[in-house]
Amino acid sequence: MPPTVIENPRALQSFIGCEIGVSEWHAITQEQIQQFADSTGDHQWIHLDRERAQRESPFGATVAHGFLTLSLISSLMKEAIQIRGTRMVVNYGLNRVRFPAPLRVDSKVRGRFSVLGVKDVGVSVEAILSVAVECNGGDKPCCVAEWILRYYS
């Protein structure tokens, strides 16, 4: 599915309250989880030890780190939405982040993006997006967040 194209950041104003894009599905592999653990130093067994996770974890398998799940939103958004007329985009932060469901290894995820608010802030346009990272076959998203981005023209 091609990304939703928005001509400039101010045009996001007309999408407030609307879903504006959905990414493709992406598999989450044990190798990705291992690389993230190595990069961050978070080697907790629920992420890396398949046998122990099967035996002892309530999830029945290894699970991705919450921060790994959160870190996927920028790449998922690139697939879902293209905003033209910017020279730079800055990740300004997050208002809220929750991990309502585990992201089990070998699952697939996709991102859903909606516009919550848009305002001019000096030399940039600030957009607040609602992000839901969905896991295929799950009843709940594995991550929900309010993401603040600043677009500079």
Image: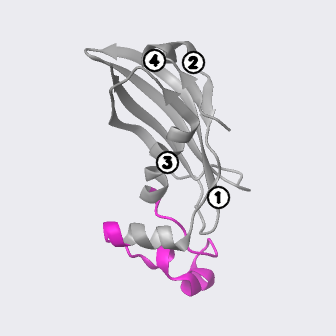
Q: What percent of the width, then of the height, locates residue 108?
A: 64, 58
Other-residue count near label 4 (Cα within 10 Å), few / some / many at <14 / 14–19 / ≥20:
some
Report the residue at 56% width, 74% height from top: 62
Give the structural element (helix, strand or loop) at label 3.
strand
Q: Nearer the viewer, residue 90 or 115?
A: 90
Image quadrant where one finds the C terminus: top left
Give the structural element (helix, strand or loop) at label 1.
strand
Give residue 108's mark: 1
Image quadrant where one finds the N terminus: top right
Task: Mark 1 or mark 3: name the one nearer the start of the chain.
Answer: 3
Q: Amino acid at mark 1?
A: Lys
Q: What percent of the width, then of the height, locates residue 129?
A: 49, 30
Give residue 8's mark: 4
Q: Which residue is mark 3?
A: 98
Magenta stretch holds residue 78: no
Q: Do the CB atoms of the residues marked 2 and 3 lie less than 8 Å apart?
A: no
Q: Which residue is mark 2?
A: 15
Report the residue at 51% width, 65% height from top: 64
From mark 4 to mark 1, how far is it between C-alphas? Answer: 31 Å
Q: Nearer the viewer, residue 20 or 135?
A: 20
Q: Nearer the viewer, mark 4 or mark 3?
A: 4
* Magenta stretch bounds: 38-66
Taking the image as shown, residue 146 lies to the left or right of residue 22, namely: left
Q: Amino acid at mark 2?
A: Phe
Magenta stretch holds residue 55: yes
Q: Do the CB atoms of the residues marked 4 and 1 lie less than 8 Å apart?
A: no
Report the residue at 60% width, 66% height from top: 104
Other-residue count near label 2 (Cα within 10 Å), few / some / many at <14 / 14–19 / ≥20:
some
Q: Do the CB atoms of the residues marked 1 and 3 lie less than 8 Å apart?
A: no
